[in-house]
Each structure stands twice: as C-alpha cells, then as structure tokens.
Amino acid sequence: MYKAFFLPTLISILILIGVFIWGGLHAFVLTTLLVILEVTLSFDNAVVNAKILAKMSEKWQKRFLTWGILVAVFGTRFVLPIIIVSVSVLVSPWVVAKLAFFDPEAYGHLLEGAHHAIAAFGGSFLLMVSLKYFFDDSKDVHWIKVIEKKLSAWGRIEAIEIGISLIILLTLALLVPGETATILVSGLVGIVLFIAMQGIANAFASEQATMVGAGSAALFVYLNVLDAAFSLDGVVGAFAITNELAIIIIGLSIGAYFVRSMTVYLVQKKTLETLTYLEQGAHWAILGLAIAMLVSLFREVPEVITGLVGIVFVGSAYWASIRAQKAASLNA
C-alpha cells in the first residue's frame, strides 16, 4: 500500500511546498483544504471506478492515470464548468474563460448562477448510476438485504430506473418554477448521457474478463464522464473556500490524482473481491450524493454533508465486509 501511494504523496508534497513558496501560508492552507474536499467527495468514486477499471486492459488502466488525469484536471475541473456557465448565462465560453483567469470573483458568481444546471445534470446522472446498480435483477450479493433484495426484484420491470429518474426530475423542476426549463433540460442531458455511455460500454462487452481495444476506450470515456459528474459539486464547493482559480485547480488536481491512484490500487489488490460489500456501500454513497445534489436545487446542502455521505457508507460497508470475512473464516 505504501508503495502505491508513495509517488502521489511525494508529488503532492512537492507541489504544496511550491504553493507555500509562491503564495505563502494562506495559499498553502487553502490548497490543502481543497485537496481534502476533493478526496472526501470522491472517495466513493474510487470504489465504483475500480469495478469498471478492472474490465479494461492494462494499457488503458495506465492511460486512466496519465491521459485521464489531464482530462480530469483541464476538462472536468476547468473546461466543463466554463461550458456549463456559458450555456446557462448565454455568454461566450471565451468571455467566461477570461473571467475565470482575470476576474475569479465574477466567475465564481456566474458559477453559482449556473448551480441549477450543474446540480440537475450531476444529480440525474449519479441517480441513474445508483438506480441502475440496485435495480439489477441478476445482482445476488446484498449488503442492506431488506432493501437491496426488493430493489433487485423490481429490476425485472423494464427501464424502471429511467422512469423513476424522470418522475423525480419532473417533480423537482415543478418545485422551482423559475428554473423549470433549466432543470428539465440539464437533468435530461444527464439521463440521456448515462444511457448512451452505458449502451456504448455494453455494445463492446464480451465474454472475456478484460475488454481490449474499442471496449476499453469506451469504458475510459465512461469513467471520465462519471468522474465529471462526481466532481461538479466539488468544483462549486471549491469557490465557497476561495475564488483564486490557480489554487482551486492545484488543490482539486492533487485530490483527483490521489483518488485515481486509490482506484488503481483497489484494482491491483483485487480489494473488491475480498471486501464483499464495498461496492454496495459505494453505490449507496452515490445515491446519497445524487439526492444531496438534487435537494440543493431548492434547499442549500452543506458541503460537510455531501462529504460525509461517502465516508459513512463506504466506511460502514468496509466494516461489514471485514465482519463477514471473519465470520466466514470461523465457519470454514
């Protein structure tokens, strides 16, 4: 474990030292807080990503840490918010990008103004991720059995997760009259994008344990879309800590690198195979995060709550998995 995280830790320390030299103690503290924010909000993402990453070839697993980190840093945490803000306020992406660099405070206000679009898109996408998992009628491993068994049985109803997601989206849109169109369009984009990415990934699925070529490439794209949905609330939350774009990018990037290193570690050590309920806990955390994002459409949800959702569910699932292992060894 120490070897797996040695390089990310070393790089992070060197970058933080550079931040301290460049911006002093204030910049160092803000960057550290942003790293903690990113890791906390994305902890469950690492577990879910590991399940998908295990299906990819070794070459694409390495690209997840190289090409993927570039997509995560510049695409998800910089370009995507600019595009969302641009579409939401009908301003040129170039103008929004200039504000991001030269007037971070104004950019932060615009990002807050695009909150409904961001929350509806990210919440709907993550809702589909969690519901698709729990409504799988072939799912035979259950953590919270009294609930998960019933959800799995309901999975026999065709496209039930899509119907539930659309009903929730429509209900929430009606609760915020001034933003109804924005919420509906953004939420529909999130739902359709999930269906499209899931379909592409399934199209390349084979009987082999590991996908190669186009199959791995499709999963690589899906992983980055999933990362984008997870990271949207972190980007918005970062502006609640500071308006300095350079510090935000550095802090969130260090956190993203740690999360991706954690994902690769889980795959290499086959952790999900030995910790039985970790995957279930991660999807409960995704459901909790999706609900928090959707509730934020009409009521403010503190970042500490969205951060704790992942830790509580994944931590509880980890503990339950350890207990199950001990019980199995005693009965063997």
Image (cartoon, helix red, strand yellow):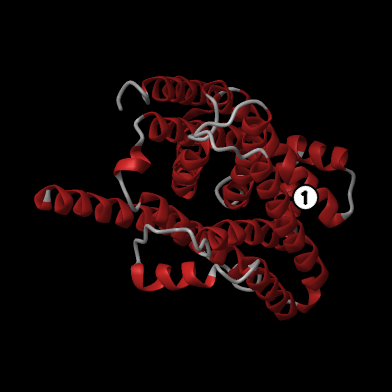
Residue extending farthest to the front is 207
Residue sitting nearer the eye, 125 or 233:
125
Neighbour tally class for label 1: few under 14, some 14-19, many 20 plus, Cα within 10 Å: many
Badge 1 amino acid: Ile
Residue 7 seen by the camera:
yes
Residue at 36%, 50% (x, y): give it.
Answer: 278
Direction from residue 98 to residue 291 in the image, left or right: left
Residue at 75%, 48% (x, y): give it.
Answer: 106
Residue 204 place in picture, x, y as percent = 66, 38
Residue 144 place in picture, x, y as percent = 35, 66
Q: Quadrant of the N terminus?
A: top left
Residue 298 place in picture, x, y as percent = 65, 73
Direction from residue 114 to residue 134 in the image, left or right: left
Residue annotated with mark 1 = 84
**Vertical comparison of 114 with 33: above or below:** below
Residue sitting nearer the eye, 216 or 4:
216
Residue 37 seen by the camera:
no
Kind of element beneath mark 1 = helix
Residue 88 place in picture, x, y as percent = 82, 56
Residue at 30%, 50% (x, y): give it.
Answer: 318
Numbered disc total: 1
Residue sitting nearer the eye, 304 or 274:
274
Direction from residue 61 to residue 79 in the image, left or right: right
Direction from residue 323 to residue 292 in the image, left or right: right
